[in-house]
Amino acid sequence: MSRGVRWAGAVQGTAAAVQLLITLSFLRSVVQAQVAGVLDDCLCDIDSIDNFNNYKIFPKIKKLQERDYFRYYKVNLKRPCPFWAEDGHCSIKDCHVEPCPESKIPVGIKAGHSNKYLKVANNTEELEDCEQANKLGAVNSTLSNQSKEAFIDWARYDDSQDHFCELDDERSPAAQYVDLLLNPERYTGYKGPSAWRVWNSIYEENCFKPRSVYRPLNPLAPSRGEDDGESFYTWLEGLCLEKRVFYKLISGLHASINLHLCVNYLLEETWGKPSWGPNIKEFKRRFDPVETKGEGPRRLKNLYFLYLIELRALSKVAPYFERSIVDLYTGNTEEDADTKTLLLSIFQDTKSFPMHFDEKSMFAGDTKGAKSLKEEFRLHFKNISHIMDCVGCDKCRLWGKLQTQGLGTALKILFSEKEIQKLPENSPSKGFQLTRQEIVALLNAFGRLSTSIRELQNFKVLLQHSR
């Protein structure tokens, strides 16, 4: 080959490379334009969240989820669906959840009561329980057993008033510890009428929507005709802030779960060896602007909004964990200290974020109306936590319950600021308390959102190459 021919080929190769770079740059801008700019109802831009999450928070939260205290979650996957007859559990093998043998659970976790997350609580709370029982017996010695049970029910009712979720009874024989690292959230093949009914009930019966709005809230509704959704979103923007926030939280949670399924998809199974990985086609089906008639970017923006809500909750609850009394007890003194150091480091990062959502803008009207709306908000969300017991796939139920409980815990924190500020340094709090179950759900749920935003960047790169 002559030198001239080689030179011409080199020039053509260089030109092709330059053209490829220009094309990739253009595609990158197209992909980023789909989900960019300032989020509605808060003064935060998506680029700031991406940079903060991917380079500061994600590496730390990933390490935290691997710690013994946060990897074991106690859950009851056998609670019956309270709303309709169950269709039966998913028979697909990937729906199965493998409970953790008792011998594998760290001694400090399995020996503790549901709200005993620190060493001193193992003794002090038992004494307090006994004292409370004795007082109840002494004060009510002349009451009938029926009246005593009523008093106990009232006490339980009072304790539940700050809960946005229905917590599993960890003392139930059906409740089991699950190793979250060995049962990762991923695509299981669970779909059809059972899955559809769950999401439809969440959107249609629990999100705030008047009967005059006929368009389904569920973004995966099978038929929406030629409606591009603009009339629906015009209506949504006309709602009060609290009701808009509620919808965005549910939509963001749905988007995050769908993103996890796209990231960890069963690509093929040969000779009994499954291959899991990102599925671009599935991602586009759920989030591409064209395939979703413009709704995909809205769903992803709601994911970012949900991230901001839970990020704000972490920054608010930091004083609760900064107290010396909190040990995150597993029985391994050295690991427990390292776990708390890592957790406090994450809290410091969350407090440094400059553009938090302002929860004080919610429920800020007249006292009576605000209180009524807040209670309605709480009960709607609590109802959604009940619906998680209707999910037919055990693995989907596990992660649905955990992420719903994590969000419910975040909401509980956001609206308990005064109680958190009054926490005593060296004794358990009466005004505000988190169970170990809530703590594990809170940090793992936020970890799922952090992973979603990190994986979204990976999909942007994959989309560039696929085009």
Image (cartoon, rainbow, N blue to C red):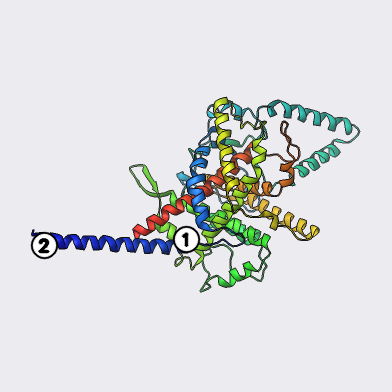
User: Dot 2: few (<14), some (14–19), or many (≥20) neighbours within 10 Å?
Assistant: few
Q: Nearer the viewer, mark 1 or mark 2?
A: 2
Q: Residue at x 54, y 26 (%)?
A: 103
User: Dot 1: few (<14), some (14–19), or many (≥20) neighbours within 10 Å?
Assistant: many
Residue assigned mark 1? 287
Q: Quadrant of the N terminus?
A: bottom left
Q: Is residue 403 left or right of residue 121?
A: left
Residue assigned mark 2? 4
Counting the numbered discs, the total is 2
Q: Say what secondary structure mark 2 lies in.
A: helix
The amino acid sitting under disc 2 is: Gly
C-alpha span from label 1 to label 2: 49 Å
Q: Whole-percent x and y of residue 87?
A: 56, 51
Q: Whole-percent x and y of residue 379?
A: 70, 53
Compare marks 1 and 2 and give the one earlier in the sequence: 2
The amino acid sitting under disc 1 is: Phe
Query: Residue farthest to the left?
Result: 2
Which of 269 and 128 lies nearest the eye of the viewer?
128
| Above or below, comparing residue 344 to residue 128 in the picture | below
Q: Residue at x 53, y 49 (%)?
A: 449
Which of 95 and 202 lies nearest the eye of the viewer?
202
Q: Say what secondary structure mark 1 lies in.
A: helix
